[in-house]
Image (spheres, rainbow, N blue to C red):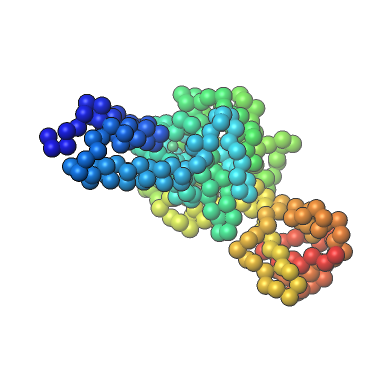
Amino acid sequence: MPANLTPDYRNAEERYKSAETVPDKLAALDDMLATIPKHKGTEKMQADIKKRIAKLKQEAMKRPSVARQASLSHVEREGAGQIVMVGPPNSGKSSILKATSNALPEIADYHGTTRLPQPGMAIFENVQIQLVDIPPFAREFLQPWMLNLVRQADGVLVVIDASDDDLLTSIEEMLAILKETNIVLHHPLAEGAPEVFRPSVVAANKADRPDASSRIELAREILGPGLPIMPVSVLDQQSLTALEREVFYNVLGLIRIYTRVPGKKADLDEPFVVPRGASVVEAATRIHKELARNLKYAKVWGAKVFDGQMVPRDYIMQDGDVVEFHQ
Ligand SMILES: Nc1nc2c(ncn2[C@@H]2O[C@H](COP(=O)(O)OP(=O)(O)O)[C@@H](O)[C@H]2O)c(=O)[nH]1
Ligand SMILES: [Mg+2]
């Protein structure tokens, strides 16, 4: 054995091989580096260990949200709004999170891979929406903190599996759980909204699979008009973009506006996100309180006005409006 590896080193190496989490792997690699005999014969091995440490650290940086889990019942809100994903096992919640965001969730073809809330930022054009993946919304997996997250989030994305013959059974189970826990999911623009509800939409995922559309029709019947279904597939980018759009505009009820300094071009990469229905003065308040206080009028470039039209303080902002505030 040219390297003369010590039992301590071998022990650390064993721990590295069997480690399942990033922190465990990192700890084992650190021990390997500390215990490896330092001589010419192990130089390559030392370099290799350092490389693995650097790579893991970089990976860990890409998922800061996992490390920041202070308590399961609360996920710190980031971006324009927080959407929690609710659905039966295997419907593709983790896959949707992965396809729309920078998160690296575990995806496996067995039930209940996700045991912790797993947030990621979905990038819809130029805004970020936080998607939180949680364990399956089925009796077998249900935990109280999951309900708390659903109650606290800005909106709910229900993900059902359009390839599953037991689709209706799992929807019924989910609806029963919601009923028992007094959580009402409803689309904000759908008729018959109760006074208190969680703004929601349903994604029927795996729409690429055979017979998906007939299953979706059956699902529409049990979910009713209050919870409209959007067919999606993680294999179809357009369907995911349409879903993000729906979540941003309708579930979260948000629009994007851009500001412009007189004589300069608007920065169309830096939207301000404001609630749908916000007036010029309300939008100004969100951007800067001082700005709103001294606001006299604004000039707006957008779909409902002619270019640079002077509008009063109570003009209702439209998505994509460019606004120049005047004091
Ligand atoms: N054909 C197809 N398979 C999908 C789609 N979305 C997810 N899957 C597969 O369905 C399985 C379960 O997905 P996963 O994201 O782990 O489901 P989760 O339990 O809801 O998180 C995995 O094998 C995925 O590859 C989809 O849109 N189309
Ligand atoms: Mg999952």
Determine whether, in the image, residue 165 is placed left or right of residue 184.
left
x and y percent of residue 116 in the render? 48, 31
Who is closer to the viewer here, 201 or 154? 154
Quarter of the image with the C terminus in it: bottom right
Residue at 65% x, 38% y: name it.
198
Who is closer to the viewer here, 293 or 234? 293
Residue 42 in the image: above or below residue 263: above
Query: In the rendered image, which quarter is residue 322 located in?
Result: bottom right
x and y percent of residue 275 in the render? 71, 51
Residue at 43% x, 55% y: name it.
236
x and y percent of residue 157 in the render? 56, 42
* Residue most extreme to the front: 39
Residue 10 in the image: above or below residue 270: above
**Residue 167 visible from this viewpoint:** yes
Query: In the rendered image, which quarter is residue 191 located in?
Result: top right
Residue at 70% x, 41% y: name it.
192
Quarter of the image with the N terminus in it: top left
Residue 272 in the image: above or below residue 267: above
Who is closer to the viewer here, 36 or 302? 36
**Residue 305 visible from this viewpoint:** no
